[in-house]
Image: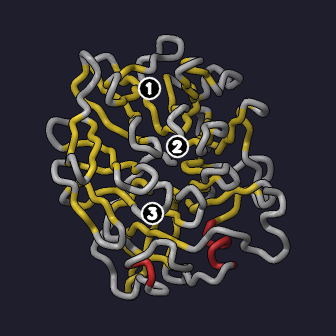
Amino acid sequence: MSRPRIQRAGRVLAGVLLAGALATDLHAGLAIVDPGIGVAGICADGRVVVGADDSGAIRWDGSAHAIPGGRIAVAANQDGSVVVGSMTSPPHAFRWTEADGLQDLGTLPGCTTSDAFGVSADGKAVVGRSICASGSIPWIWDAIGGMRSLGALDDATQGSARAISRDGSVVVGFSGTHAFRWTAQDGMQDISPALSADAWAEANATNADGSVVVGRYGSPGVGARPLQFRWTAATGLADLPSAEWGATSPGNALAIDGAATRIYGSLFMFLQDASLWSAASGTIKLVDYAQAQGLDLSDWMLDEVVAASDDGDVLAGIGTHRVGTAYVPASWVISGLAGPIFVDGFDSGD
């Protein structure tokens, strides 16, 4: 449940595998690995990571499997058996299964390009955007109704669906300068209505049932940093506090676990750091969380979490890895992170 991001990665580096188990089982234990691809998403059970390398779309389960005709794979369903993303030619969204191969989802009428960014747990509903001469339009697709526009807020000309809940009932994204939450019953709902006229917001991810939405918002201006947010029907759009930075968390919330107890993304301060939020801890650096559990990250810099499994046990992201005396750009997959980290009750507020 995440917004797509890509970091091109090189070959699998010698010595990257820790605990050895990730090559065959992403839930085998506490470990970090460079999958050798640019990571963009992860399936709900955490056993398949998707993304791209220089050859195109990749499905990775310890070994890389090409998706012929795909440019980039962005999201996967519950067990990774359904993958969605963008094709090379024509530049359309795709839905892939091993049995049926690559399915061109087409695009909305009057548009030339489409991209898929999210898929439901059963693989039956796909969401994304279509690009037209007049702008971009968020959509939802299923086998019965095909691709359908989700509409726009205040006649906005730019928009995108970024993610769909695992149960397929809720779609989130942005329309114009506002974040939205969409359901078939209520249509498109502005979840950032109280922002100032010159502010902007975008929703990047939602939890399993769509009741919690996360993303970022900001205002123009020199030195202004976007801020992470968490939305529920009860609280509205709310800042994510952090122990180190106070009432807000500068950065971007990009992923959330199925139960909505953990939010992942990146912190923007003097440097960019992969981040994790819980009710008890506020937003903290992922490196502190992982090293407290015993993961050796002395050769790694973790910049951003782009995707998380539903149980939070497996995370995928981007950063840099030390090879000799040099740090090189690399994607990473970390497993074994579910459960309490600190003995003083880190998760007591979840």
Cα–Cα gap, marks 2 and 1: 21 Å
Q: Residue at x 38, y 83 (%)?
A: 323
Indicate the secondary structure of the residue bearing disc 2.
loop
Mark 1 touching mark 3, by CB under 8 A?
A: no
Which of the 4 image quarters holds residue 224? top right
Query: Which residue, given by chain and number where applicable, does mark 3 sit on?
Result: 318
Q: Residue at x 70, y 62 (%)?
A: 284
Q: Residue at x 66, y 51 (%)?
A: 259
Query: Which residue, given by chain and number where applicable, does mark 2 sit on?
Result: 166
Location of residue 341 with respect to 80 vertically, above or below: below
Q: Which mark is residue 159?
A: 1
Which of the 4 image quarters holds residue 91? top left
Location of residue 110 with respect to 281 vertically, above or below: above
Q: Nearer the viewer, residue 272 or 179?
A: 179
Mark 3 residue crowding within 10 angstroms, few (<14) / some (14–19) / many (20+): many
Indicate the secondary structure of the residue bearing disc 1.
strand
Between discs 1 and 3, the one toward the N terminus: 1
Residue 338 in view of the camera? yes
56 sits to left or right of 121: left
